[in-house]
Image (cartoon, rainbow, N blue to C red):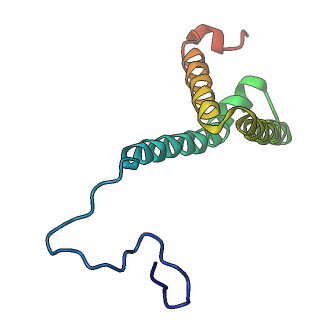
Amino acid sequence: MRRGTAGRRLSGVSSTPREPGRTAAPSPTAPRQTVALAAMMFAVAMTFIDQTIVSIAAPDIVRELDLSSSGMQWVVNAYLLSLAAFFALGGRLADLYGPRRVVVIGTLVFVVSSVLCGCVPRAARRRPG
């Protein structure tokens, strides 16, 4: 291994010269790493989308539940507290059962619950009166 300017090792850098025009063979783990990166980016994007839901739905929540501004602050705080608790739970479950399994199960639960929320009939969403 070669050493960098600060004395650190440069991993993966060969000191033997290559023939001109030859490229390194692709790593057999490259497709798996790409899929893993895409899955993690999707999971992070879902987290960001999920965190914007309360602020987007705030006017409807205030109107439907007839809340004051302090009541809406309680709703936001309750949402953030439960979100943080489930992040901690997800981390512990990933330690116990493996991160891949927990991410897949969490994604499926999120998708199924989102679909079920979207299937609620319009009349059931409105308060009578």
Q: Is residue 127 left or right of residue 45?
A: right
Residue shown at 60%/8% (left/top)? 123
- Residue 11: where, in percent of width, then height? 48, 72
Q: Is residue 2 left or right of residue 76?
A: left
Residue shown at 64%/38% (left/top)? 99
Which quadrant of the rendered structure holds the C terminus?
A: top right
Which residue is farthest left? 21
* 47 and 80: which is toward the camera: 47
Residue shown at 47%/47% (left/top)? 37
- Residue 107: where, in percent of width, then height? 58, 29
Q: Examine the rendered structure and indicate whether residue 83 appears above or below residue 127.
A: below
Q: Quadrant of residue 52?
A: top right
Q: How many marks?
A: 0
* 42 and 119: which is toward the camera: 42
Q: Quadrant of residue 73?
A: top right
Residue shown at 85%/39% (left/top)? 74
* 68 and 81: which is toward the camera: 81
- Residue 32: where, in percent of width, then height? 42, 43
- Residue 40: where, in percent of width, then height? 53, 44
Q: Examine the rendered structure and indicate whether residue 12 appears above or below residue 8.
A: above
* 26 and 95: which is toward the camera: 26
Which residue is farthest front? 16
Q: Quadrant of residue 115?
A: top right
